[in-house]
Image (spheres, rainbow, N blue to C red):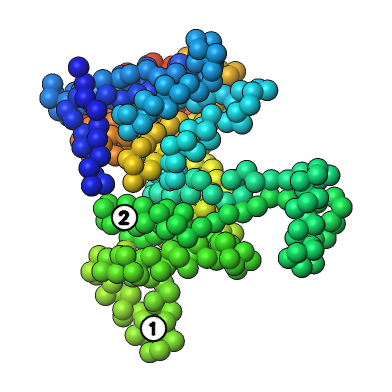
Amino acid sequence: MGDRIEIKDGKLIVPEKPIIPFIEGDGIGKDITEPTQKVIEAAVEKAYGRHRRIEWKEVLAGQKAFDQTGEWLPDATIESFKDYLVGIKGPLQTPVGGGIRSLNVALRQTLDLYVCLRPIRWFKGVPSPIRYPEMVNMHIFRENTEDIYAGIEYMTGEEETTKFRDFLVDEMGVKNIRFPESTSFGVKPISKDGSERLVKAAIRYAIDRNLPSVTLVHKGNIMKFTEGAFKNWGYDLAEEYFKDKTFTWRHYESIVKAHGKEAADDALAMAKDNGKVIIKDVITDAFLQESLLRPYDHSVIATMNLNGDYISDQLAAMVGGIGISPGANINYKSGYAIFEATHGTAPTIAGTGQANPSSLILSGVMMLEYMGWQEAAEEIFYGMEKTFSKRKVTADLHAYMEGAELLSTSAFTDEIIKNMY
Ligand code: NAI
């Protein structure tokens, strides 16, 4: 019998045989879940022999849940994630015509998983549209609970919308609604608390992994009190909370003003020598360009929900697309974390043995790292790297790789296991 993972004073306590709940997922979820578990089990055994093992516990969501219980996301599933803290999930289709907009969003909101973490790394051999994909090593911290995605929206013509518009115009004196009679509205909540907990998680992650920088990505030049405030709160937090471990670009600029550029450059060089994490900021549109042209300039990226959505997909495309990009939704305070495939249910290839399981497998790698089982994570990473470098791939990548060998989902999985250390 396995045991529960617990959290004490902000630190995870992971037993030798932790119980990990998993959602199989819809569509190709069934095709990729078992292979992923097989790879994780093989890696854990290779790394720790019989001392450690994962006890999988299936929990229901999506079509399978609806067929068995009449609910898309049963309370028992949420309770399991709360009980066991760490879980993994396949893709879920968005129910058509149901009351739930997205099961993924419901999970994130109910468990308050405020960080959407996406590491972006390139594997040798995987086709990439950019010139130096080997220089890509970025980690996106996307805020998951706020922003224009909070769902506070009003459709033009509806009674509430007219009330909202009249409030803005009559009470608040707003004058620049260009077409008041036909305008819909969306509200963009960005809070100090929400920004701080996100940036704190990003900086701590950079410190723990000896990563060189955290870039705050924002459109604060236009949206001063939301995105601009995010940037300022981020800098404030770094300078107050992580004073000894970071050096901010804002501080650099203040030295330039007071003592000139040379003094500021010296201070920056000294900070780098001392292993401090450099905290900088970039406007979103410039970031989208820079990440393509000079990906080596950025390491950890901290940003709000909408920017994070765009950035995640662009950076994923740079290293081979969503088929191989992993993700996690995490609350570092409660410890709740759900690791997930970032692609959808790919219904047209479900059950054909063509699905690429890499996204879910790499989410498993992130899960092992989160649990502190680094050695097992490295086994998988190494096995996968070697498989790609031998040009053995599934159909999605095969189409773009000359001279590659086409493997089914299960043959690809076996190859990864064979190629571990
Ligand atoms: P999708 O990601 O399922 O498919 C987009 C394209 O990528 C398709 O051509 C598909 O065949 C291919 N593809 C995706 N994953 C693949 C893999 N592992 N191996 C090989 N090929 C792969 O996106 P789509 O079609 O927009 O959405 C389908 C369903 O998935 C919808 O119900 C949507 O709501 C849901 N969805 C769920 C997500 C989640 O649970 N995290 C994320 C995105 C979509």
At label 2, the amino acid type is Arg
Residue density around tag 1, few if under 14, some if 14–19, many if 20 or more, within 10 Å:
some
Which of discs 2 and 1 lies nearer the camera? The answer is 2
At label 1, the amino acid type is Ile
Q: Is residue 85 above or below residue 167?
A: above
Q: Is residue 366 above or below residue 77?
A: below
- Give x and y (percent) for residue 80: 36, 25
Residue annotated with mark 1: 255
- Give x and y (percent) for residue 365: 32, 34
- Give x and y (percent) for residue 90: 45, 25
Q: Give the residue at x 25% y 39%.
A: 7
Counting every numbered tag in the picture gives 2
Q: Nearer the viewer, residue 30 or 393?
A: 30
Residue annotated with mark 2: 204
Among the two numbered marks 2 and 1 on one chain, the one whose residue lies closer to the N terminus: 2
Q: Is the CB of the residue bearing disc 2 within 8 angstroms of ligand 1?
A: no
Per the model, the C-alpha gap separating discs 2 and 1 is 25 Å
Q: Is residue 31 above or below residue 224?
A: above
